[in-house]
Image (cartoon, rainbow, N blue to C red):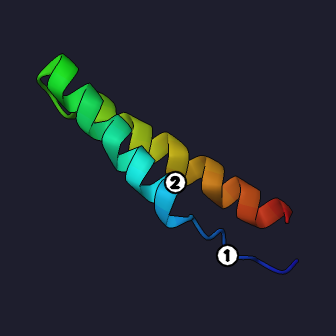
Amino acid sequence: MVKRDVIWTRTADIQFVGILEYWVKRNKSNTYSKKLVKLVTERTKQIADKL
């Protein structure tokens, strides 16, 4: 099986960072943002494996 790269657009990257910053400010902690990064990373790897 060939592994492909998932390339995020600049807009998607900026929006994702904005989402992470929102949750840090809202929760006054970066714990949830770290969890989101982990989940998105896992899903991105799954997508790359299925392409």
Tally of numbered discs = 2
Q: Residue 12: tell me if it is visible.
A: yes
Q: Which residue is mark 1?
A: 5
The image shows residue 15 at horizontal and vertical percentages of 43, 46
Image quarter hosting the C terminus = bottom right
Q: Residue at x 24, y 38 (%)?
A: 21
Give residue 12's mark: 2
Left or right of 48 in this view: 40:
left
Q: Residues within 10 Å of mark 2 (few under 14, many from 20)?
A: few
Dot 2: what SS? helix
- What residue is shown at x 42% (from left), y 37% (from top)? 36
Quadrant where the N terminus sits is bottom right
Q: Is residue 34 visible?
A: no
Q: CA distance from mark 1 to mark 2?
A: 15 Å
Q: What is the number of the mark on residue 48?
A: none
Residue 6, quarter of picture: bottom right
Which badge, 1 or 2, comes first in the chain's sequence? 1
Q: Quadrant of residue 49?
A: bottom right
Residue type marked 2: Ala
**Is disc 1 surrounded by few (<14), some (14 to 19) or many (20+) residues within 10 Å?**
few
Q: Position of residue 34 (x, y in %)?
A: 31, 40
Residue, x 63% and y 48% (percent of image)?
43
Residue lying at the far left of the rendered structure: 28
| Left or right: 37 in relation to 11 | left
Vertical order, 32 against 9 (above or below): above
